[in-house]
Amino acid sequence: MVITFLILFGLAVVWVLSLLVHPFGRCPLCFGKGNLRRKRRRRAPKCPLCKGLRRRQRLGSRTVHRIRAQVAAHWREPQ
């Protein structure tokens, strides 16, 4: 039971650290191409999820960066 908890806690820590380093991931709809595939020779439209930017913000990255900014602001306050 304790080992399972430690493994899950370790995975959560690794996930949070990966969010700090890589807050954006490739778009799941266009697979990072920026546009959708067409079978005919027409021009492929922009992806509706990423708007052609080829990336999406990962789940939890805004929260992690907001917490990091709050902690940094707290430490910068004059005492």
Image (spheres, rainbow, N blue to C red):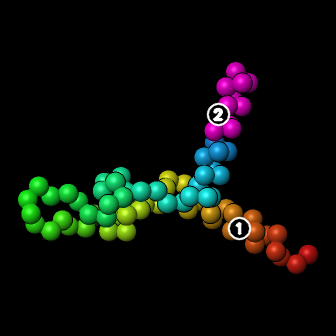
Q: Secondary structure at mark 2?
A: helix
Q: Is residue 2 above or below residue 46?
A: above
Report the residue at 73% width, 24% height from top: 2
Q: Position of residue 26 (x, y in %)?
A: 41, 56
Asked whether 3 falls inside the magenta stretch, the response is yes
Name which residue type carries label 2: Leu
- Tag nearer the camera, 2 or 1: 2
Q: Is residue 48 left or right of residue 4?
A: left
In the drawing, what numbered circle is on residue 70? 1
Q: Nearer the viewer, residue 57 or 40?
A: 40
Report the residue at 9% width, 63% height from top: 41
Q: Which quadrant does the C terminus fall into?
A: bottom right
First to last magenta residue range: 1-11
Image quadrant of residue 50?
A: bottom left
Residue 40 visible in the snapshot: yes
In the drawing, what numbered circle is on residue 34? none
Residue 49 visible in the snapshot: no
The total of numbered circles placed on residues is 2
Q: Position of residue 5 (x, y in %)?
A: 69, 29
